[in-house]
Amino acid sequence: MSEVPISHILFVSTALFFIGMYGLFTRRNMITMLMSIELMLNSVNINFVTFNKYLYPEKLDGIFFTIFIITIAAAEAAVAIAIIINLYRSHKSIDVEDATEMKY
């Protein structure tokens, strides 16, 4: 079985990162912004696993970093969804522009 070149994997990872960045900067919906951040984190995970496999195949450092990032991303998603639900209950919208007008 042939092995995928590292350049192809890094190209996919870079494309995912910039798609996530584009989504983060151009969308006003908080859920799509959250999904864009998750795309960016997944592209970093792909980089960690790729460099671990090609540079240090006998070590598991990249895998451990990836598991740590997945754990942090899950906690970040839970907190962000709680904030989005709270924002929707108070303003009946999840638009970022409405969040700047919040008054407590």
Image (cartoon, rainbow, N blue to C red):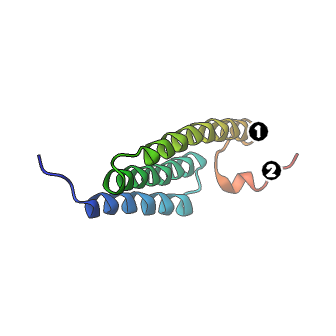
Q: Earlier in the sequence, mark 1 or mark 2?
A: 1
Q: Residues within 10 Å of mark 1 (few under 14, many from 20)?
A: few
Q: Which residue is mark 2?
A: 102
Q: Is residue 104 left or right of residue 9?
A: right
Find residue 15 and report its image quarter: bottom left
Give above or below for 103 relative to 27.
above
Nearest the viewer among 57 and 81 is 57
Residue 83 at what x, y percent from top left?
A: 70, 40
**For numbered disc 2, what is the local secondary structure?**
loop
Image quadrant containing the C terminus: top right
Viewer-proximal residue among 16 and 5: 5
* Type of amino acid at the residue the image marks with label 2: Met
**Above-or-below relation of 89 to 40:** above
Left or right of residue 25, residue 9 in this image: left
State the CA–CA distance, disc 1 to disc 2.
Answer: 9 Å
In the rendering, at what x and y percent does residue 12 appear? 32, 58
Q: Are marks 1 and 2 in contact (CB under 8 Å)?
A: yes
Indicate the position of residue 56 as horizontal and vertical percent values.
36, 53
Name the residue that disc number 1 marks. Answer: 90
Local secondary structure at mark 1: helix
Residue at the location (73% across, 36% down)?
86
Point 64% across, 51% down: residue? 95
Outermost residue toward the front? 58
Question: Which amino acid lies under the numbered mark 1 shown in the image of this protein?
Answer: Ser
